[in-house]
Image (cartoon, rainbow, N blue to C red):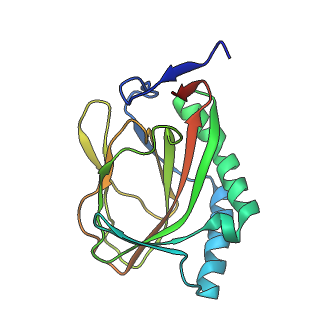
Amino acid sequence: MGNIKYFNNIKDLPRLTEVGWAMVKCPDDILSIINRCYKQLVEKQPRFDVVHSKAGIKAQLFDINQHFSKEGKEILEGLKPIHEEWCNQPLESSMIWGVRSYLEGSVLPIHTDNLQTHHVASTIMIDSDQDEDWALQVQGHDFNVVDIYQKKGGMVMYESGKCKHARREPFKGRFYRNLYVHYKLKNFKYK
């Protein structure tokens, strides 16, 4: 326990990388698992589990843990070493959100993620019904906000507990689907 550092606000959460975010391609083996689950989802045409309609978010959520718990764990654990290498810190798996399907007109207000459990995250672009991409804005450690555009299989890693992020422009298509993974720092604890 002697190596544990405690923090209780965003200022005390350390910067882990130079910029605060990075765009990479999701590894093919993990993307294959994601696409296999997604294909089954689309073929079954189920109703999505949760509908959000607050603060401009118009989205449906397909809980991957409920329907594909084994695969969800494989995805989360399979991506952990990539995140650990990127931030140069040991991590613990926190959560995998399912496939979030944003609907027409949706925006994502600027925010940081849960300070207790979501220190490092990724969003992986899965599918969209439009050719025009929908920018993710991330405020890096230099306080500049950048527009990040993802193609299918693109993965944006970001320090989600520290760096503000949003999708400010209303989405113009019928659906934009991505998957989120979250990790917490092993050697830093929220107090």
Query: Quarter of the image holding residue 97?
Result: bottom right
x, y percent for residue 131: 35, 74
Identify the residue shown where x is 58% and y is 27%.
Answer: 89
Q: On screen, 137 above or below 16? A: below
Q: How many marks?
A: 0
In the foreground, 161 or 80: 161
Q: On screen, 29 above or below 184? A: below
Q: Position of 62 compared to 59: left or right?
A: right
Farthest residue to the top: give it. Answer: 2
Query: Quarter of the image holding residue 40?
Result: bottom right
x, y percent for residue 77: 69, 47
Identify the residue shown where x is 57% and y is 41%.
Answer: 183
Farthest residue to the right: give it. Answer: 70
Q: Position of 165 compared to 88: left or right?
A: left
On the question of residue 75 being in view, the answer is yes
Image quadrant holding the N terminus, namely: top right
Q: Position of 129 compared to 76: left or right?
A: left
On the question of residue 88 being in view, the answer is no
Identify the residue shown where x is 28% and y is 66%.
Answer: 56
Q: On screen, 144 above or below 51? A: above
Q: On screen, 40 above or below 99? A: below
Identify the residue shown where x is 64% and y is 87%.
Answer: 44
x, y percent for residue 179: 53, 61
Farthest residue to the front: give it. Answer: 191
x, y percent for residue 189: 56, 27
